[in-house]
């Protein structure tokens, strides 16, 4: 019997899939470095930075959760900004999201995978082998994505829960060996030090909101999206806090002597010399998990922008039998491979953090606008208690974080947004002169 033909995305993602993607993206390579870096700034009071960042991202999680319930469409933060502020803001947010954040992050993650493999197998340090490796990773991820979101999620769940359960096992053993003198402190550190450490942590938390990008493929998006995302954020916050306490409690000042690999040092203390190899394998799985989720979810943002008429309509094509945005998948796959293999992403990585924060800021503004206008086509959507207050607190926190960026980062993101605005205006004028519709 022939497969059923469709022009729409298939709703095959449940709450477990949303939670998995949040964990997959947020718990990446950063967790293997952060404990020592934060300890180097705050010492025994390091947990305060995790609590501060956890509060900020819990507020963000609540805002994004309500947005996901109000606007249960494919596209995530892009579609919220587009619905709230119109096509120009949507155009800028869309390209910032998939190019200024997603493609560059994929290039960095693929190279991180090759670097981890190269630390044990020197052949991965050779250019030809690295390019072949990037091609294989990209082709495999795109193939699963092309086949369907369900197939991709099976693989992502295997990687993610292997990573999560392995970290839980390591931390559980470490917690039994904690020296409480290592996690106690007297007096409160300077707020500037807490802020400096928090900046490092915030960059590690970035990305989990991408789990909301496939709203059009969720089985019950008004419930699945917000609840899965908020549960995932809570698990990430608790996970980061517990991992740090375990590492600090066992290692104490030893973390300062091995700042590049504190969890490897922790595993070595517990398991001996084989601990390093175990953490090396675990870090490879962690990065691959993050990369797989981003490659899977990113085409949904490109597809949503094309479906809204902001990008070329061919990018909104859905495969008639698999129900996937196959043109967007192939386009981004080629782009991700090209950036990873050429190393061009390195010159543009300065955009990633700034672009993420700009998109967050736009999404929180959209959240407040929807609230103040009480605008939603969805009955019984998820509504955050004291939501206006939470939204304003979140905006203030994001603004503070944004202006902690370097002058080069601020200049780069400013110029990129200006360039996108000019492109949009020129494109609009050309369409007007040719009597073409500006948006669908």
Image (cartoon, rainbow, N blue to C red):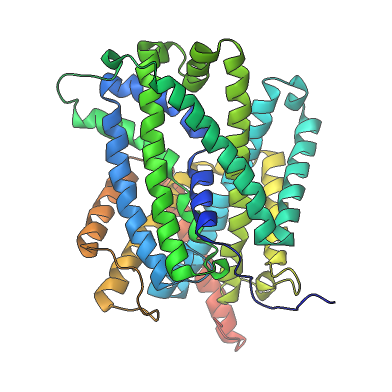
Q: Is residue 232 left or right of residue 140?
A: left
- The reply to whether residue 346 is visible in this rendering is no
Q: Is residue 385 left or right of residue 226?
A: left
Front one among 131 and 163: 163
Residue ID at (43%, 70%): 222
- Kindly indicate the quadrant of the structure image that contains residue 365: bottom left
Residue 77: x and y, percent?
45, 62
Residue 242: x and y, percent?
38, 31
On-image quarter of the N terminus? bottom right
Residue ID at (32%, 35%): 50
Residue 256: x and y, percent?
40, 14
- The reply to whether residue 373 is visible in this rendering is yes
Front one among 206 and 126: 206
Q: Residue furthest bottom?
A: 435
Q: Residue furthest left?
A: 187
Front one among 398 and 310: 398
Q: Is residue 253 left or right of residue 155?
A: left
Residue ID at (43%, 67%): 223
Relative to 427, is 246 above or below?
A: above
Residue ID at (52%, 67%): 215
Residue 438: x and y, percent?
55, 82
- Kindly indicate the quadrant of the structure image that contains residue 435: bottom right
Relative to 352, is 251 above or below?
A: above
On-image quarter of the C terminus? bottom right
């Amino acid at each position: 019997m022939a497969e059923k033909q469709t022009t729409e995305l298939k709703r095959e993602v449940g709450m477990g899939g949303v939670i998995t993607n949040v964990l997959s993206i947020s718990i990446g390579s950063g967790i293997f470095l952060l404990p020592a870096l934060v300890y180097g700034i705050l010492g025994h009071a390091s947990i305060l930075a995790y609590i501060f960042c956890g509060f900020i991202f819990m507020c963000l999680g609540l805002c994004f959760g309500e947005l996901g319930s109000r606007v249960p469409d494919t596209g995530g933060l892009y579609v919220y900004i587009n619905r709230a502020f119109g096509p120009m803001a949507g155009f800028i947010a869309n390209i910032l999201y998939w190019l200024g954040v997603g493609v560059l992050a994929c290039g960095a993650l693929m190279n991180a995978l090759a670097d981890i493999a190269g630390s044990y197998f020197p052949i991965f340090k050779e250019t030809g082998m690295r390019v072949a490796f990037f091609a294989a990773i990209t082709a495999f991820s795109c193939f699963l994505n092309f086949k369907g979101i369900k197939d991709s999620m099976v693989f992502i769940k295997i990687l993610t829960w292997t990573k999560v359960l392995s970290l839980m096992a390591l931390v559980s053993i470490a917690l039994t060996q904690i020296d409480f003198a290592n996690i106690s402190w007297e007096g409160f550190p300077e707020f500037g030090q807490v802020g400096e450490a928090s900046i490092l942590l915030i960059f590690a938390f970035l990305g989990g909101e991408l789990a909301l990008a496939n709203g059009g493929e969720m089985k019950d998006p008004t419930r699945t999206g917000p609840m899965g995302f908020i549960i995932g954020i809570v698990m990430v916050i608790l996970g980061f806090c517990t991992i740090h306490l375990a590492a600090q409690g066992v290692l104490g000042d030893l973390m300062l002597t091995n700042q590049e690999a504190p969890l490897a040092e922790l595993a070595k203390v517990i398991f001996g010399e084989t601990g390093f190899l175990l953490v090396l394998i675990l870090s490879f799985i962690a990065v691959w998990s993050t990369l797989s989720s981003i490659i899977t979810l990113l085409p949904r943002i490109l597809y949503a922008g094309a479906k809204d008429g902001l990008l070329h309509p061919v990018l909104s094509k859905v495969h008639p039998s698999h129900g996937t945005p196959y043109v967007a998948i192939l386009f981004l796959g080629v782009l991700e491979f090209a950036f990873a293999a050429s190393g061009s992403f390195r010159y543009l990585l300065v955009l990633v953090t700034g672009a993420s924060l700009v998109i967050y800021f736009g999404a929180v503004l959209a959240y407040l606008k929807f609230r103040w206008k009480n605008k939603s086509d969805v009955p019984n959507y998820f509504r955050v208690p004291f939501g206006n207050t939470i939204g304003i607190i979140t905006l203030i926190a994001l603004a503070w974080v944004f202006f902690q960026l370097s002058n080069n980062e601020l200049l780069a993101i400013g110029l990129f947004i200006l360039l996108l605005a000019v492109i949009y205006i020129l494109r609009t004028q050309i369409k007007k002169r040719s009597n073409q519709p500006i948006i669908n």
